[in-house]
Image (tube, grey):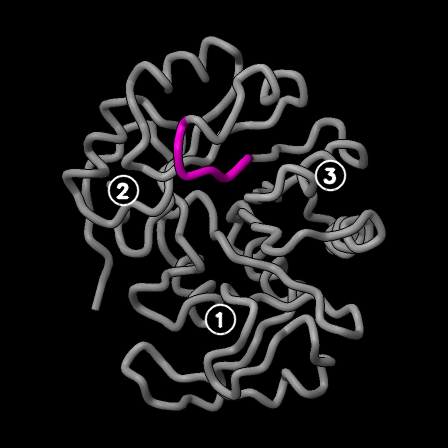
Amino acid sequence: MNTIYFKNKKTEMIAHRGLSALERENTNAAFVAAGNRSYFGIETDVYATKDGVFVLHHDAMTKEGQLVIEEQDYETLKQVVMCDVDGELRNDLVLPLLTDYIRICKKYNKKAILEIKPKMDDETVARLVDEIRQQDYLSGTIFISFHWDNLIRLRALLPNQPLQFLVQREEEYSIEQLVQHQIDLDIYHKSVTKKMVKEIHKNGLLINCWTCNHIKDAERMVACGVDFITTNVLEGK
């Protein structure tokens, strides 16, 4: 098992949910696997538990145990043992804490690409920011979200923080809004065009694309001039 290499030129590579092609996504094992490779950043998804603990998982409900994360306290959720990519239970695979992930990113000098998965209120967003600040790693963090309001809350707290708006299609964003709030674009790779990238760059913004797992698609993204490629398995060389 290994990554698939391709010539990424100046485009930075981001490991989607950690190195999720090799290790169970959004686990410390996946984060460390990405940390040991050439990735620019490690992406993950964050939720707050019922008792306010920040944990990392992609879906709102755990696959093992079918527990809704936001409806459970952390003491319950930390008992959930997850399966490896081969489907076998592995006792070390449990829901990571946000602090675990930040420490791994910091140790391996990787950008923390942190997706705020659900809509969060002002107080929760402020606590999230404070937790990362306590780890002294806001400078190494890029926040992303499909929820515009999450990004506006972050911008109010962090005027100069890198933020990215996640969308699937071009019609889901306004270049004027992105420029007004200095929020970069993170868009589905099949929606990316050279014209789009040129406009984003002309307005002083950056563009990330998700989730690109085939060499031909990645080569097209590099030719378009995107700044970042988010991927499960590709690695630049």
Circle nearer the viewer, 1 or 3: 3
Mark 1 and mark 3: Cα distance apart in space: 25 Å
Mark 1 and mark 2: Cα distance apart in space: 22 Å
Whole-percent x and y of residue 233? 27, 55
- Looking at the picture, does residue 130 appear above or below residue 222? below
- The magenta segment: 165-170
Residue drawn at point x = 61 percent, y = 76 percent: 68
- Residue at the left extreme, as displayed: 216
Q: Between 149 and 13, which is closer to the camera in this rendering?
A: 149
- Residue at the front extreme, as displayed: 171
Q: Between 95 and 181, which is closer to the camera in this rendering?
A: 181
| Mark toward the start of the polypeptide (3 vs 2) | 3
| Mark toward the start of the polypeptide (1 vs 3) | 1
Residue drawn at point x = 58 percent, y = 22 percent: 178
- Looking at the picture, does residue 65 appear above or below residue 163? below
Q: Which mark is residue 154?
A: 3
| Mark toward the start of the polypeptide (1 vs 2) | 1
Residue drawn at point x = 64 percent, y = 70 percent: 97
Write down the residue under mark 1: 27
